[in-house]
Image (cartoon, grey):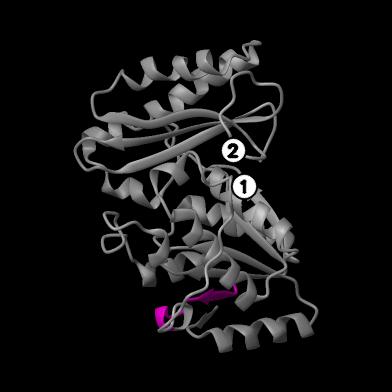
Amino acid sequence: MKIIRSCAEMREYSLAAKSAGSSLGLVPTMGALHDGHISLLKTAARHCDNIVVSIFVNPIQFGPQEDFEEYPRQFERDCELAKAAGCGCVFVPPLEEMYPENYSTYVTVENLTDALCGACRPGHFRGVATVVLKLFNTVMTDTAVFGAKDAQQVLVVKRMVEDLNLPVRIIVSPTLRESDGLAMSSRNAYLSPKERMEAPLIYKGLTAAKKLYDGGLRDSYQIRKSVLPVLNEGSLIRPEYVEVVDMVQVKPLDEIEGPALLAISCRTLNTGTRLIDNVVLGGSL
């Protein structure tokens, strides 16, 4: 497995792979790899000849009071996991190449970023779209794999790819969960033992709401309302939002008439950890 630490070397690697007839698949990450990331790498391997995982903790998608400095960094372990998963290359772009002095170009995807995490984290998706486009351009990937847990991110990236005519196929891999239903996330490591015990209530609430939808309920308010008693079974989980939105403009729905996203964001009281999860009602990402 090759470790690449410059954008120029990454382009050389990609051009050589393409010249040899190999297709390239990219899994963008911020490191701290877990089984959820490994599932993305395995998905990429089913569709592409050569797999690149990028590891870059992207400063411009973090807000002023967020956890950029504390975000877990485990590079050697990440490389071992990536190699074991069959990854051919780890791309670690340096900050000074991604955002050199006087950097001033950003990507804004409008409308889709107004609600959900976009409302809670102003500027977050501008940072996501910018770094993803830069990674696409540098790796020159044919395919990129994202996890369904970050559903709004998936919708934003897909819109960017379509609007900017990017020759990249986006594949969405299902959310990988712990045995108790908690969606795998690098931030789960922040949870206190009691918070970790309560965190599965998020998926339990989503499951209860989806059961109502599957039984014929289409009233968005009633579906959202059904989640709250489940979350209230714990004392350390507080919702930031529980929303049902359409999957084109990410706008709140009153009545569900087509595929919809039921999305939850919560914060824990002790550690302030932010957890997100979702289910798609009547469709897929």
The residue that label 1 is drawn on is: 155
Farthest residue to the left: give it. Answer: 270
Badge 2 element: loop
Q: Is 40 covered by the magenta stretch? A: no
- Residue 121 x %, y %: 39, 48
Q: Mark 2 points at which residue?
A: 250
Q: In the rendered image, which quarter contains the N terminus?
A: bottom right
Q: Is residue 135 left or right of residue 98?
A: right
Residue 13, horizontal then vertical, whole percent: 64, 85
- In the image, is residue 95 part of the stretch drawn in magenta? yes
Please determine whether, in this image, residue 273 is positioned above or below residue 46: above
**What residue range appears in magenta?**
88-96
Mark-to-mark CA distance, 2 and 1? 8 Å
Residue at image position (57%, 21%) is 210
Res 163 visible: yes
Report if residue 83 is visible in the image: no
Q: How busy is the neighbourhood of tag 2: few (under 14 within 10 Å), some, or many (20 plus)?
A: many
Name the quadrant containing residue 175: top right
User: Are the residues flagged by discs 2 and 1 in contact, CB closer than 8 Å?
Assistant: yes
Q: Is residue 145 above or below residue 86?
A: above
Q: Around disc 1, counting alpha carbons within 10 Å, would you say few (fewer than 14), some (14 to 19), or many (20 or more)? A: some
- Identify residue type, mark 1: Leu
Return the disc, 2 or 1, that comes first in the chain's sequence.
1
Q: Is residue 129 above or below residue 182?
A: below
Q: Name which residue lies at 31% across and 37% down.
A: 267
Residue 96 placement (x, y as % from top left): 41, 83
Identity of the residue drawn at 66% across and 11% down? 216
